[in-house]
Amino acid sequence: MNLQQLRYIHEVARRGLNVSEAADALFTSQPGVSKQIKLLEGELGIEIFVRHGKRMVAVTEPGQVVLDIAGRVLGELDNLQQVGAEFSSEDAGRLSIATTHTQARYALPPVLRDFMRRYPHVRLELHQGNPRQVCEMVLDGSADVAIATESIAEYEDLVTLPCRQWNRCVIATPKHPILREQPLTLDAIARYPLITYDDAFTGRSQINKAFLGRGIKPKIVLTALDSDVIKTYVGMDLGIGILTRMAYDPVADRGLGMIDAAHLFESSTTRIGLRRRAWLRGYVYAFIEGFAPQLTRKMVEIALNGGGEDYQL
């Protein structure tokens, strides 16, 4: 048994049992990956994967236990590498952040600007995806930090730290009658074609919950993956939009009007996600505190090691 074999089974599982994709990601050959997995299975005396012909189609029950252990071993190996890097070069390295479009576009720019000024020798990587994708990036080691709203608290292997709360607004072309509704109601919104987020993104579940709670079915004509797309189609007067409040800028979006809708929807909480028991370099703690000043290094360390992450904002 060797670390290479553990990497192979971990990557095959991560790639949805696609051995060819795993081999490409590991810069090796498909037959080589398959051979090493067979050798590992022979040594352990179990089958890790269920096969149909030459294809892997599922993970066996003992195989899942092996994969869980392999993930922990590889995670600890990454921790060892991080320790070495921290003490050999404290202010140089890489910080990989996985986040959604809304956070990358509207919440992170001033934080990343300040971080880059403080740590000019740290290479920043910004990966975008839906909340589930950004969580998976942290769990598989391709990102250090996840920042998202929906779904992030559902992953047991992630420590999730609430850091910011936000709510929504309604946007429309400047002369649209919805902007004159006082007070704004869900019934008023439902009278017009609606443009909002895709089901996987940015607090959409709170939007659905609010309408369902009143027995109202809104006329959703278009859903989008990010705020800029919503604003584009609202600007074409194809409907009114429900938007995260942080995404509306009265200067940049002067072609659109806005009315606050926080009283209509439950607030959403942006969370930071970290791999449980990860060893973080000093500048990662600095980034986290820059994004959420209440999350001190001591608080994050306590959470990473088994407690303290479920505090309230």
Image (cartoon, rainbow, N blue to C red):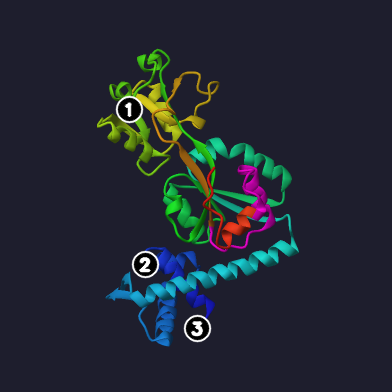
- The one nearer the camera, 272 or 247, is 272
Q: Amino acid at mark 1?
A: Leu
- State whether residue 200 is above or below residue 239: below
Q: Which mark is residue 194?
A: 1
Which of label 1 and label 3 is nearer to you?
Answer: 1
Horizontally, is 81 left or right of 191 in the view? right
Real-space Cα separation, disc 1 to disc 2, in angstroms = 40 Å
- Quarter in which the C terminus is drawn: top right
Q: Quadrant of residue 189?
A: top left
Q: Residue 54: tell me if it is visible.
A: no
Q: Position of residue 77 (x, y in %)?
A: 59, 71
Q: Does dot 2 land on a helix, a strand or a loop?
A: loop
Q: Residue 270: tell me if it is visible.
A: yes
**How many other residues sit within 10 Å of disc 3, few (<14), some (14-19) or many (≥20)?**
few
- State whether residue 63 is above or below residue 227: below
Q: Residue at x 43, y 45 (%)?
A: 150
Q: Does dot 1 land on a helix, a strand or a loop?
A: strand
The earlier-in-sequence mark between 2 and 3 is 3
Q: Does dot 3 land on a helix, a strand or a loop?
A: loop
Q: Position of residue 53 (x, y in %)?
A: 27, 76
The earlier-in-sequence mark between 1 and 2 is 2
Real-space Cα separation, disc 1 to disc 3, in angstroms = 57 Å
- Per the image, the residue denoted by label 3 is 1
Real-space Cα separation, disc 2 to disc 3, in angstroms = 21 Å
Horizontally, is 44 left or right of 127 in the view? left
Q: Which mark is residue 17?
A: 2
Residue 283 in the magenta stretch? The answer is: yes
Which residues make up the magenta segment? Answer: 275-298
- The one nearer the camera, 99 or 178, is 178
